[in-house]
């Protein structure tokens, strides 16, 4: 699957906060378990790993640094030697050193996973592609909430998830299965 | 609607190329007419105007600089004194001087319109918000094509349009009506 020997794993916003929104049923409830599996494999293969955490500017957000839910989820706790980037915007490249770090690591391919498909994952994938990286998104390792449309219609979480992934695929990234990703790294 | 006296208008990819895709029925067929109206009002009010054009890296694209359809559509031809930015990525801030120019103009609020809702408009809105601008998107002044989902389902152009606008609204921008926008500028 990869054409380089150093694909990086970038995990977006997998903090306890994600379980503290009143946004309805989230799809892919096992996304964190899948991410833990990918993370384990990246560690075993000694490949670059970046943990991105969201520090909301809004004090009432569960993602605010003062919130009890700001910490990483148990499935995605960084190890000492792994890089942590803290962002305040949806896109992980805005206001962080992520791009410089990837360049320093000699990375040309990135795997992006985490939450939410249609917010921080989407925003980060779009800019990663714009910056010239080849981007892969494992579909089972990201998730969405339902969306209330401005014209009054309702979009279920699973539909939001597939609509945003399908829009990214081909134009900004390659959407793949977690299994295919896991079998590509050893 | 605006809290500053210098809201900028940023028009994205309104080139003849957009009529040369075999992507099915586009919604908002009058989007260019609406954009022409907004552009006229911005000119009358002597407010900052940026025309962004897409120069595709792919020779077979109607947006490639060598294509006969690379030129702006008649509804949105820049005047001599107006700024033109040429981009090769979806996001108009990547590889261009748009951000510097907006800062130089003292702009804090931007109106973003053009095509497509779910590609260059979305990518530009997300980064504009991330860079700290207050962003407005007039719903009738942008448009989408249908989307074939990776899981085999089909999403009509009108649904793509409203799903992506609804996702941006509140988080990255304020979606408004063209009428409300036009009545806010004089």
Image: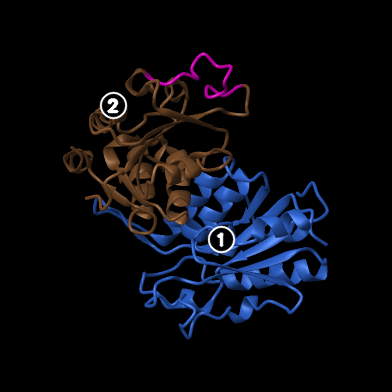
Chain colours: A brown, B blue
Badge 2 crowding class, 10 Å Cα cut-off, few under 14, some 14 to 19, many 20 or more, is some
Range of residues picked out in magenta: A60-73
Q: At 34% from the left edge and 40% from the top edge, which residue is drawn?
A: A8
Residue B173 appears in view? no
Q: Quadrant of residue B25?
A: bottom left
* Residue projecting furthest to the top: A68
Q: Position of residue B124 (x, y in %)?
A: 56, 55
Magenta: main secondary structure: loop
Q: Chain of mark 2?
A: A
Residue A35 covered by magenta stretch: no
Q: Is residue A60 visible?
A: yes
Q: Is residue B70 left or right of residue B99?
A: left
Residue A66: give x, y in percent of width and height.
58, 17
Locate residue A63, reporting x and y percent: 53, 24
Q: Which residue is mark 1?
A: B95
User: Which residue shows up at 58% across the image and 39% down it?
Assistant: A95
Task: Tell me: residue A128, above or below residue A170.
Answer: above
- Residue B95 point in image, percent of width and height: 56, 60
Pick the front one: B145 or A85: A85
Q: Residues within 10 Å of mark 1 (few under 14, many from 20)?
A: some
Query: On the image, numbered disc 2 is attached to which residue?
Result: A36
Split into 4 quadrants, where in the image is the C terminus of chain B? bottom right
Residue A70 on the magenta span: yes
For residue A97, side relative to residue A156 (left or right) = right
């Amino acid at each position: 699957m990869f054409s380089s020997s150093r694909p990086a794993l970038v995990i977006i916003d997998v903090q306890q906060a994600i379980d503290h929104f009143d946004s309805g049923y989230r799809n892919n409830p096992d996304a964190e378990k899948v991410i833990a599996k990918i993370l384990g494999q990246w560690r075993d293969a000694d490949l670059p790993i970046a943990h991105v955490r969201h520090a909301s500017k809004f004090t009432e957000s569960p993602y605010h640094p003062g919130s009890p839910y700001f910490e990483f989820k148990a499935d995605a706790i960084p190890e000492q030697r792994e890089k942590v980037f803290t962002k305040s915007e949806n896109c992980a490249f805005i206001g962080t050193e992520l791009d410089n770090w990837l360049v320093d690591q000699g990375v040309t391919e990135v795997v992006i996973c985490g939450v939410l498909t249609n917010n921080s994952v989407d925003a980060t994938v779009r800019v990663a592609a714009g910056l010239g990286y080849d981007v892969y998104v494992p579909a089972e390792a990201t998730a969405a909430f339902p969306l209330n449309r401005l014209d009054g219609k309702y979009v279920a979480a699973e539909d939001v998830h597939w609509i945003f992934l399908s829009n990214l695929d081909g134009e900004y990234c390659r959407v793949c299965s977690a299994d295919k990703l896991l079998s590509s790294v050893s």
